[in-house]
Image: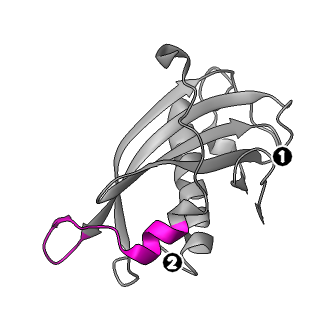
Amino acid sequence: MVQPNVAHHPFGVEVPMRWGDMDAFGHVNNVAFHRYLEEARILAFAEWFEGWTGGAQDRPVVLLARQEVEYLAQLHYGPRPVFIEMWVSDVGGASWDLGYEMRSGPDPEETLYLRAESTIVAFDVERQSPRSLTDHERTVLGRYTGEPVAMRRRR
């Protein structure tokens, strides 16, 4: 289920947890958090870029160049999905940064599990190199622009 959440950040999405995401300590493993962010990106880009699925046959092709995660609370498995808000925090010539907050639900007062930021690079598969963002991509990304991620270590 994709839900716009204009009051806080421009885009929000629910991502289900899986039983196998738990580790030996009984909480969701940190690797699973990265998968949840990946799922959120795929759902967001499919909506933002009108049905894009991320495969090489569907343009635009993008690559994850960097991802920084700040874990803020333990997440225990449950039937309720996590809620991930995301926004574009910066746009460059061939890349953009995505900010994220993962919570137990869409209400900003719910438990905040992580903040993260990813750098996404537009990529030309034939040339095997980054490519410039198109005017259309810049327009789409501009709809979801927000503030830089408020990482604790950056304050």
Task: Name the residue: 55% across, 33% down.
Answer: 149
Choose the circle earlier in sequence order: 1 or 2: 2
The secondary element bearing badge 2 is classed as loop
Q: Could one spot residue 32 in this view of the protein?
A: no
In which image quadrant can residue 125 be found?
Answer: bottom left
- Segment colored magenta: 124-140
Give neighbour class at mark 2: few <14, some 14-19, many 20+ (Cα, 10 Å): some
Query: Is 19 located above or below residue 13 in the figure?
Result: above
What secondary structure is found at the residue carrying circle 1? loop
Residue 47, position as x, y percentages in the image: 62, 72
Q: Position of residue 115 (x, y in %)?
A: 59, 32
Q: Residue 50 versus residue 1: which sits nearer the camera?
A: 50
Tag on residue 9? none
Q: Quadrant of residue 33?
A: top right
- The residue labelled by disc 1 is 80
Outermost residue toward the left? 127
